Amino acid sequence: MERQQPLQDAKPSPLEGSASLHEEVLSRLRDSIIEGQLPPGARVPERQLCETLGVSRTPLREALKVLAAEGLIQLLPNRGARVRELTEKDIRELFDVVAGLEFVAGRAACEVISDDEIAAIERLHYQMYAHFIRRELSDYFHLNQAIHRAIVDAARNSALQSAYASYNGLIARVRYSANLHRDRWSEAMREHEAIVDALRRRAGEELGLLMFQHMRNKCAAACGRSQAAEASEPQPTVSD
């Protein structure tokens, strides 16, 4: 399994002056949150991030505003920003919504998806599998999300696309962390094999149910990790 690079160990990578400065800063910050380099509840170290990314405060703060709108961070008046924490109740409710959206997307996509779109998703799947074999979680996850978005987009429903982007963005970090358990990651890969097979056959009801259960399994794994982490925390002792 790949080792997450601590934020403080990251080498500066100057972005100032690049053609897509805003998008690059936003992408880097979002990945830092999703991959746990900026953990839930942590203060966002603006000065350190400016040095690491090689940018001024202005593009950084613009990116933070976008992440706040996406629900990934909280802006604190006169106190900077903090990574948003989700309770187990939040996680379960959000996964239920996303699971329902993926069920609808899978069923609808099979009615209208083209051969070229299926072939493109299959290519993404094989690339993702290669990263799975090499245990390259970050690259695996980016392709994983691309596959799910491609199926949602294939449903040809703009309202569905908008709702999915909004709710899925809130649980991206949780989806990523669920794969940190080796057994769950292997299970998720097998589930994707079944998803692509159903898509190839345009078996809409089957695909919708597979995607729904895939999300429910991901939720169970994520909540299991959360409970295990809480159980491992030292408990306060009561002095006499």
Image: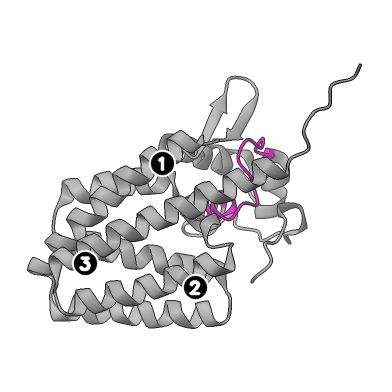
Which region shows up in magenta? 29-46
Give the residue drawn at x 12%, y 60%. 108
Residue 115's place in the image compared with 35, above or below, is below
Give me the disc on residue 92: 1
Secondary structure beneath label 1: helix
Q: Residue at x 40, y 75 (%)?
A: 190
Q: Which mark is residue 207?
A: 3
The foreground one among 29 and 142 is 142
Q: Work out whether residue 125 can be spotted.
A: yes
Name the residue rendered at 65%, 52% in the picture: 37
Image spot of residue 203 (x, y percent): 14, 72
Q: How many angstroms separate mark 3 from mark 1 (CA)?
A: 22 Å
Residue 21 sits inside the magenta stretch:
no
Q: Position of residue 159 (x, y in %)?
A: 17, 45
Read off the residue under disc 2.
186
Magenta highlight on residue 33: yes
